[in-house]
Amino acid sequence: MTIRYAAFATALLATTALTTAAASAETLRWARAAEALTLDPHSQNEGPTTTLMHQIYEPLIVRNHAGEMEPALALDWAPSADNPNVWVFNLREGVTFHGGQDFTAADAVFSLNRAMSEASNFKELLSGVIEVRAVGDYTVEIETDGPNPLMPNNLTNIMMMDEGWSTENDAVDVQDYAAGEDTFSARNTNGTGPYVLTSREADVRTVLTAFDGYWGIGTFPLAASEIVFTPIQNPATRVAALLSGEVDFIQDVPVQDLDRVANADGLGLATAPQNRVIFFGLNVGADDLTLDDVEGANPLADPLVRQAMDIAINREAIQQVVMRGQSAPAGVISPPPVNGWTAELDMYPAYDVAAANALMEEAGYGDGFTIQLDCPNDRYVNDEAICQAAVAMFAQIGITVNLSALPRAQHFPLIANGETDFYLLGWGVPTYDAEYVFNFLYHTRNDGRGSWNGTGFSNPEMDEMIVSLSSNTDLVSRNQTIADLFALAEEELIYLPIHNQILNWGITDAWQTLVDADDSVKFKYFTME
Amino acid sequence: MFSYIIRRVLQSVLVLLVTGLVAFAMFRFVGDPVDSMLGQERTMQDIERLRENLGLNDPFVMQYWNFLGRALQGDLGISYRQGRPVAEIIMERLPATLELAAVSGLFALVLGIGLGVFTAIRRDGFAANAIMTLSLVGVSLPTFLIGILLIYLFSVELGWLPSFGRGETVDLGWWTTGFLTKSGLIAIILPSITLGLYQMTLIMRLVRSEMLEVLRQDYIRFARARGLKERTVNFRHALKNTLVPVITVTGLQLGSIIAFAIITETVFQWPGVGLLFINAIQFVDIPVMAAYLMLISVMFVGINLIVDLLYVAIDPRLRTEGKS
């Protein structure tokens, strides 16, 4: 019995040893919680999908780890000297697609038009574009309905496809889920990126191999010759897979497991502040809240109440206890790398229950009131725990908060439909410009803007300033407008900032990388010892 | 007989239709798929247009009617999450779940009967008591905890078995199997133990109590008096007579093994229909949720129908009732 058992164990050991050896030193096995939804580069504008796309396809301009724009398929770009409404992009020459086709201006025009089409999730980023045209083989002009200083910022996730390949394979149109379409481009790829898709089973395994015709060979380390991607949803299993050596790199290390990963032999953490700020939104626009106990009035419409709530939040306690140090307390609705952010703005008020109670008294709510807080429980790091901590903090100033924690699919529609009085939200700024913050979160909600403004807040003066940001090309006056907008926002206090998230990637010691603030891995930068 | 069968089949179809109706009524509480389908930059117009295009503004009865109409033509729709035909995705995932269910069912049956007989025969032995005590753990610990404990022990500490996935699979054209590769075989060990442990304990306790009952019967005593070998008495006479209820329970448990697979599949990232369903709920992927629930209810209703028909075949009294 014992002998047989031992033989069985040895056999198992041998097989696992074999699998470890078979995975050559240059294979990078990568796991994260979420799977890419599609392979169509213009269909889904969502983190995990975009991250996978960045290995296979490339945009004209790409962001590096610091969030700065770097030339990718465009070498340089500038507004046209003749027409302020036109941006001119000079393209990189000698770039080939995985299928061998040359990348030219016609492909760029085709791709940008495709990204602007009805079924594309990227069309809002190109909403002011009138025409995209090729001037010669390696120059592209984008004409907008007015000067657009942010055009390059908006292109960093818009991937370039080959026109010929798309036409031949009937993939000219972006996949339209609503029409029940199943398109070629959702299952097949042909990009210019550093890695070629070798095989893919959705939710199981995606294999990428290095592209031997890549233009960036010699420019980038490109240490991984093969990448095997597996989504592992369960956090405990994901960490176990890293600890047992079955994967080399995981993107989402749960905060409670950080010490384990950091202390494990041969493993380390790569850490950087994330481009995402977490905050509470307050319904200031309603005449009367639906889920409170104050009749005929909206306590949140009173600036004194909002100030009291602001100083009743103990941001440092949330950082230390709920986030285990993995957050940076914030004083403004803007992550630090964003244009317009200043350290002064980000100063958060001191936690002061006595002063908060005095403000409540002054506002006429000395006895407090009851309100409901809507919170997601599967979207941000420890989102529900943050809300639970806040419930206790608001109780100290007499506000009884009923917590309703829901999955994201139920939480976000509450904000979209304006059905919440008090909610938690996180905001990343992919354009790295404050215009993106004001446009979506502060502008009056109408057809085109303010779609994430669930507060009912409306300030025509601010609206006018926000609209001017998208066409003001004079950087000095534009930045002044942004500073003025932040000053107004601070006065209004419709959002109570909590903190900026911190990203932690778990990785074996054999590999080195810097962490990207957008959580968008770019394997071409990975180096190996 | 014939009219009885027709009546049972019609009842089954009615149950299926009602299940579907209840499912569609529930979908609205799961959330709104539109938010996951559109990017962060979506405008209020985009939301409204997509809702309209997907038919989400229609009353749920209408949505259900449209689903049925298409399903009868063999079209289960396109997954909101993956953008591929639902029928294709389910056929791709079904082998993983069925293989896992088969292995864990087999594990539960073989070990459950073996240990049940052992604990019944060695009723007061130390080993039997130890097994009985340990089996309480199997019943009382939740599946996900058992899974995580097994991963911690066998993957992280000992490094013997993989913590996630199905290993390499072989595509037979209509079926992908993990039984033909070494990595596939070692990958199924932990998930099938996790999934089968509860059922194993159940079968073991059932066999044990049935055995104890049977061993007290007169014919066992007579068999012993005749001087038959202990093994013959225990296995030929006693065990055989305990198996009838065991088989009934095992059959009924088969359905719940597939249903419980959801948790096991999530813990081990096992790419079966259970994991597919969990992802569909998180994304509010209505076509996948609808197809999965219909599949499961067809399965349950089918099993029950077969059982009912078997009763008729076994019990002549039901047959005459049907005739009258």
Image: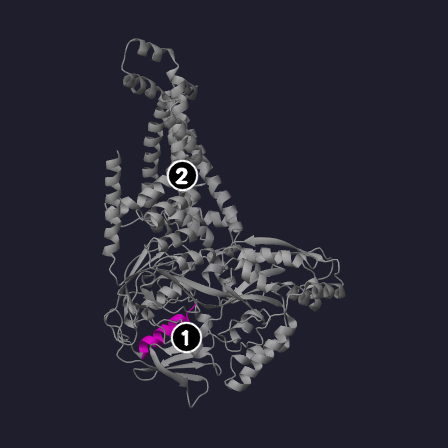
Q: Is residue B5 visible?
A: no
Q: Position of residue A432 (x, y in %)?
A: 47, 74
Q: Position of residue A105 (x, y in %)?
A: 32, 79
Q: Residue at x 35, y 79 (%)?
A: A74
Disc marking residue A155: 1
* Picture quadrant where residue A483 is located: bottom right
Q: Which amino acid lies under the numbered mark 2 shown in the image of this protein?
A: Val
Q: Is residue B9 left or right of residue A196?
A: right
x then y, percent, for residue B257: 39, 38
- Main secondary structure type of the part rendered in magenta: helix
Q: Per the image, is A113 magenta?
A: yes
**Which label belongs to residue B184?**
none
Which residue is label 2 attached to?
A: B298
- Identify the subunit bearing mark 2: B
Does A227 appear in magenta?
Answer: no
Which stretch is magenta?
A105-118
Quarter-of-image position of residue A270: bottom left
